[in-house]
């Protein structure tokens, strides 16, 4: 298993594969979040990623930064999804967590080395995922993410409740003081 991460527009072959799989995901109207994979949602990404197993793509995602976040803070696993053929039940849960953990580790390494990230985070609108995710990441790859009970502003509209999300983070937690939360 390995993860390729690149800046959009710098690798024609990977860009093309990513776009093909993005269109497939966006076209799957049976998936409840298919609209999240529209082309415009990837325009501001700092990097794109594809994780491969046996040279076949299994999960895709992106790395993102926004003006409403502290400088040098990056969201990893942004718009993260499994290629249709690899959704559960085709992957056992333990193997799925290996894929998740290895992709997270690759995103962190890339964000720190290539983007000079001081803080990386994952976010979700829903509750009850932080403890599980941090436990799995510590077990699988030895990375200790932290979390708290606050919701942080993840998009530019503070009036939109969906823009306030719970996070798990890794890195310089002093940057959290520069970020709107509630």
Image (cartoon, rainbow, N blue to C red):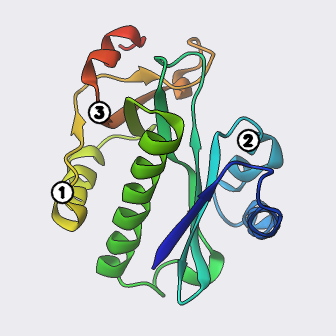
Q: Which residue is mark 2?
A: 41
Q: Position of residue 48 (x, y in %)?
A: 64, 53
Residue 89: image quadrant is bottom left
Q: Is residue 100 left or right of residue 47?
A: left
Q: Is residue 123 visible?
A: no
For disc 3, the neighbor class at 10 Å (few under 14, some 14 to 19, many from 20) is some
In percent of the image, x 36 and y 57: which residue is there? 105
Which residue does the image show at 22% across and 28% down from the upper left? 148
Residue 26 drawn at (x, y percent):
76, 59
Badge 1: residue crowd in 10 Å (few <14, some 14–19, many ≥20): few
For the question of whether residue 27 can be seen, the reply is: yes
Which of disc 1 and disc 2 is earlier in sequence? 2
Q: Which of the two marks, 2 or 1, is nearer to us in this view?
A: 1
User: Foreground residue, 103 or 80?
Assistant: 103
Work out whether 98 lies above or below 42: below
Q: Residue 139, located in which quarter of the rendered image?
A: bottom left
| Mark linked to residue 102 | none
Q: Position of residue 6 (x, y in %)?
A: 65, 54
Q: Is residue 92 above or below residue 178?
A: below
Q: Earlier in the sequence, mark 3 or mark 1?
A: 1
Residue with the most extreme front position: 113
Image mark for residue 138? 1
> Front-most of 54 and 41?
54
Between circles 3 and 2, the one closer to the viewer is 3
Q: Which residue is labeled 3 in the image?
A: 171
**Residue at horizontal 48 percent and vertical 88 percent from the top:** 90
Q: Which circle's residue, 3 or 2, is located before the other in the chain?
A: 2
- Determine whether 73 is above or below 34 in the image: above
Contact between labelled residues 1 and 2, with CB atoms less than 8 Å apart: no
Assess whether mark 2 and mark 3 are in contact (beta carbons under 8 angstroms). Answer: no
Q: Between tags 3 and 1, which lies in front?
A: 3
């Amino acid at each position: 298993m390995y993860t390729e991460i690149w800046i959009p527009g710098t690798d024609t072959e990977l860009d093309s594969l990513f776009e093909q799989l993005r269109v497939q995901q966006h076209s799957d109207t049976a998936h409840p979040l298919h609209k999240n994979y529209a082309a415009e949602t990837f325009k501001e990404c700092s990097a794109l990623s594809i994780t491969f197993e046996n040279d076949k793509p299994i999960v895709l995602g992106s790395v993102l930064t926004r003006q409403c976040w502290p400088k040098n803070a990056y969201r990893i696993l942004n718009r993260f999804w499994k290629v249709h053929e690899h959704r559960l039940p085709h992957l056992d849960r333990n193997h799925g967590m290996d894929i998740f953990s290895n992709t997270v580790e690759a995103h962190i390494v890339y964000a720190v080395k290539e983007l000079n990230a001081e803080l990386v985070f994952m976010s979700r609108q829903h509750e009850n995922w932080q403890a599980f995710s941090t436990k799995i990441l510590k077990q699988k790859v030895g990375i200790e993410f932290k979390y708290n009970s606050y919701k942080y502003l993840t998009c530019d509209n503070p009036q939109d409740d969906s823009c306030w999300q719970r996070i798990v983070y890794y890195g310089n937690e002093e940057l959290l003081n520069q970020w709107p939360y509630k």
